[in-house]
Image (tube, grey):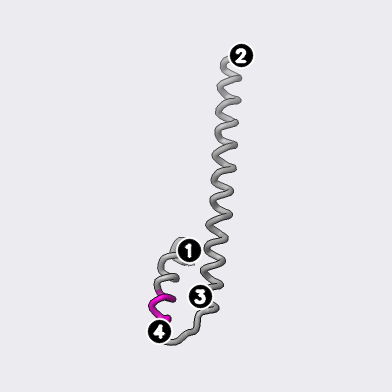
Amino acid sequence: MATKYAAARDVAYQWRAEYRKAKSENKSLRRVYQEARALLKRLPTDETTSGLRDAVRNAVLFVGGE
């Protein structure tokens, strides 16, 4: 009986660790997404930066879902 509860506890600890890892990764991705949006707002809208703007938008904002 003790081994069944120990195994369940181990699984719960593993799930908790995975949840914390995913949560921290999500925070860092959100931070990258926000920085990319801020960069797009700061860039001038002339023809020389249009390629850079398109590349940032396609790469980062696609991941963000917008």
Main structural element of the magenta stretch: helix, strand or loop? helix
Q: Which residue is labeled 3 in the image?
A: 40
Which label is found at residue 65? 1
The answer to whether the residues at label 4 and label 1 have Cβ atoms under 8 Å apart is: no
Q: Is residue 65 above or below residue 45?
A: above
Q: What is the three-letter code of the residue carrying label 4? A: Thr
* Residue visible at 56% across and 21% down in the picture: 7
Q: Earlier in the sequence, mark 4 or mark 2?
A: 2
Front-most of residues 6 and 32? 32
Cα distance, mark 4 to mark 2? 68 Å
Residue furthest to the top in view is: 1
Q: What is the three-letter code of the residue carrying label 2? A: Ala
Q: Earlier in the sequence, mark 1 or mark 3?
A: 3
Q: Which residue is labeled 2 in the image?
A: 2
* Residue visible at 57% across and 15% down in the picture: 3
Q: Position of residue 16 (x, y in %)?
A: 59, 36
